[in-house]
Image (cartoon, rainbow, N blue to C red):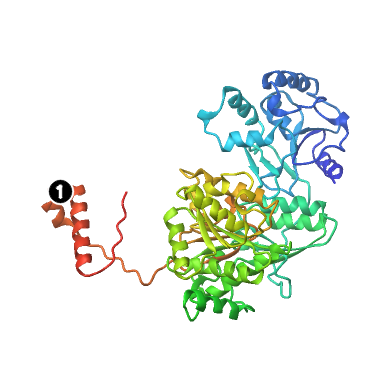
């Protein structure tokens, strides 16, 4: 394929320099290589010395007589300015269009992991002069380095090269999108086609190496005309290069039949003293930004959690779950009932549910509520837990007396080996409560939230478990896409996604003018604010009403 495409370029441009972008060059003739030496590890080179050496080759090959010469993209980026001035031959880029913006890393750096840490996890003030110099060298070649927590693979982007004509390695049209997947198993691998390229990149590498037939459902995160990353063309290419059967689906939800409904309802009545599950409003087709909603029972989400957990426990393919639901929707019931159900079903080897929660007060409140319901198979370990109490809880976990454990991300990641916490127990699910904090707090003052995804990805190499996220605060789409940020940060696997209706019909906003109060308080805004707040609280106390005061 590479030879024939180069011949095609040569036929159009006699005596041409072909710059290879994302293309393997091992089988190309060495005598046609523009530079007869290799750059080696890019972060170890002396850029000025190498440029001097390359300059000599530019003079020597200024008017070469071969049909073509080839060079790597990294080589071109070092000499692009000199090449414009000296070279007398045409230059063209041959891009491997199986990829779009990001390309698999090809071992061109001495320690990609360490360099990635320096780029994205250290402030400039924390870098040594040597590290800064190394990153400056790398910036000559790559724009961005990305890391897949799921596969452990790194991907790179190149700086723009709009000045050159581009030829694509593969000729392909867009794959036709047909939403017809009736009768397909729900356990099929699902990959969401979104701005985040990493899941698709990982799949590409795996599909090219797999000899078996793969059936894959690709989920559109938006209208097909708006799909990013040239996915549909790449799918056509991949279909030619590998053994895959492609199906399409939308990021939508629908009511499902629930086979274990009676058992879930029994737990609800016995433990929570409710007669029925609540029906919640969710957006039906979120990627179309439609306002149409569908009512889904809490029971369906409970069943999804149970099913995906059991698939993971059986060593089969499973999916994560992402739930946005308004405050007061009963989110704790939706993850506590699956834990209680699984503990009853697997009495001999009970899976442990971990709940990652941001605040000690929230953890204590939920544990205390369960204690009031006469359930004692729930506990929390946090920074305020006395050592003797912590040891007691750890013993109860190992003896299968605790089935739900509330933790902060700091407590979870405190020890590298999780057996310190869970002993020989199986992990059932990991619940991330208040999941919007993963990206909002993680980027500022709770670094352990930022590293949570990396930690869980490593943990998944040892244990198989779904990640379930719950939040009442999530933006879908746009620059502040919390769904995409959270899904990417936690490296969620083809999540079953529920986006709850955000409008609260039982909340009335009433804004009153405070002009008179401002005048009475001498036009002092701080005094006026305090006066109005105190006045409101006195009125609420007199009427026996609840009030919420937000302090900054």
Q: Residue at x 12, y 48 (%)?
A: 522
Residue 46, how many percent across, how many down? 69, 20
Q: Residue at x 62, y 54 (%)?
A: 422
Query: Going by the image, does 141 lie left or right of 11?
Result: left
Residue beneath label 1, please?
523
Q: Nearer the viewer, residue 497 or 100?
A: 497
Image height of 97 relative to 368, above or below: above
Number of numbered discs overlaid on the protein picture = 1
Q: Residue at x 63, y 78 (%)?
A: 260
Kind of element beneath mark 1: loop
Residue 479 can be seen in this image? no
Q: Nearer the viewer, residue 399 or 257?
A: 399
The picture quadrant where one finds residue 284 is bottom right
Residue 272, how many percent across, how many down? 48, 74
Callout 1 crowding tier (Cα within 10 Å): few <14, some 14–19, many ≥20: few
Q: Nearer the viewer, residue 299 or 71?
A: 299
Residue 215 can be seen in this image? yes
Residue 96, how many percent across, how many down? 75, 45
Image height of 530 relative to 371, above or below: above
Residue 373, how many percent across, how many down? 47, 71
The picture quadrant where one finds residue 183 is bottom right
Q: Nearer the viewer, residue 393 or 22?
A: 393
Image height of 321 relative to 408, above or below: below
């Amino acid at each position: 394929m590479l030879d024939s495409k180069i011949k095609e370029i040569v036929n159009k441009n006699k005596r041409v320099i072909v710059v290879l972008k994302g293309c393997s060059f091992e089988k190309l003739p060495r005598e046609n290589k523009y530079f007869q030496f290799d750059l080696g590890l890019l972060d170890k080179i002396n850029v000025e010395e190498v440029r001097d050496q390359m300059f000599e080759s530019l003079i020597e090959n200024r008017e070469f007589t071969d049909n073509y010469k080839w060079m790597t993209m990294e080589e071109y980026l070092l000499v692009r300015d000199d090449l414009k001035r000296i070279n007398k031959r045409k230059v063209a880029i041959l891009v491997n269009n199986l990829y779009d913006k990001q390309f698999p890393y090809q071992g061109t750096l001495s320690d990609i992991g360490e360099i990635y840490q320096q780029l994205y996890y250290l402030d400039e003030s924390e870098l040594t002069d040597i590290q800064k110099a190394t990153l400056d060298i790398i910036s000559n070649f790559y724009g961005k380095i990305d890391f897949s927590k799921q596969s452990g693979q790194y991907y790179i982007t190149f700086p723009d090269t709009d000045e050159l004509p581009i030829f694509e390695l593969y000729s392909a049209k867009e794959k036709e999108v047909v939403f017809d997947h009736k009768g397909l198993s729900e356990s099929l691998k699902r990959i969401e086609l979104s701005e985040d390229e990493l899941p698709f990149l990982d799949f590409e590498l795996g599909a090219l190496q797999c000899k078996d037939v793969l059936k894959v459902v690709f989920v559109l995160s938006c209208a097909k005309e708006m799909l990013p990353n040239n996915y549909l063309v790449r799918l056509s290419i991949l279909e030619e290069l590998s053994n895959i059967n492609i199906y399409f689906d939308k990021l939508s939800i629908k009511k499902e039949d629930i086979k274990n409904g009676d058992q879930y309802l029994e737990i609800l009545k016995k433990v929570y003293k409710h007669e029925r599950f609540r029906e919640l409003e969710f957006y039906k087709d979120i990627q179309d930004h439609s306002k149409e909603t569908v009512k889904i029972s809490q029971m369906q989400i409970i069943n999804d959690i149970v099913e995906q957990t059991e698939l993971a426990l059986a060593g089969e393919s499973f999916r994560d779950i992402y739930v946005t639901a308004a405050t007061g929707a009963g989110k704790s019931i939706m993850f506590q009932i699956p834990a209680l159900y699984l503990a009853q079903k697997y009495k001999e080897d009970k899976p442990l549910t971990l709940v990652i929660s941001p605040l000690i007060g929230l953890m204590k409140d939920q544990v205390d509520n369960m204690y009031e319901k006469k359930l004692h198979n729930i506990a929390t370990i946090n920074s305020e837990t006395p050592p003797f109490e912590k040891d007691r809880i750890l013993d109860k976990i190992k003896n299968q007396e605790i089935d739900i454990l509330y933790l902060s991300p700091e407590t979870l990641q405190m020890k590298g080996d999780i057996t310190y916490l869970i002993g020989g127990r199986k992990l059932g699910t990991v619940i991330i409560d208040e999941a919007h904090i993963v990206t909002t707090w993680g980027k500022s003052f709770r670094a352990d939230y930022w590293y949570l995804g990396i930690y869980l990805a490593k943990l998944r190499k040892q244990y198989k478990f779904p990640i379930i996220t719950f939040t009442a605060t999530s933006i879908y789409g746009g620059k502040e896409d919390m769904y995409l940020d959270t899904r990417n940060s936690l490296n969620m696997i083809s999540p079953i996604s529920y986006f709850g209706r955000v409008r609260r019909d039982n909340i009335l906003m009433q804004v009153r003018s405070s002009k008179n109060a401002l005048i009475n308080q001498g036009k002092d805004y701080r005094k006026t604010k305090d006066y109005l707040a105190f006045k409101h609280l006195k009125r609420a106390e007199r009427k026996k009403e609840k009030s919420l005061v937000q302090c900054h």
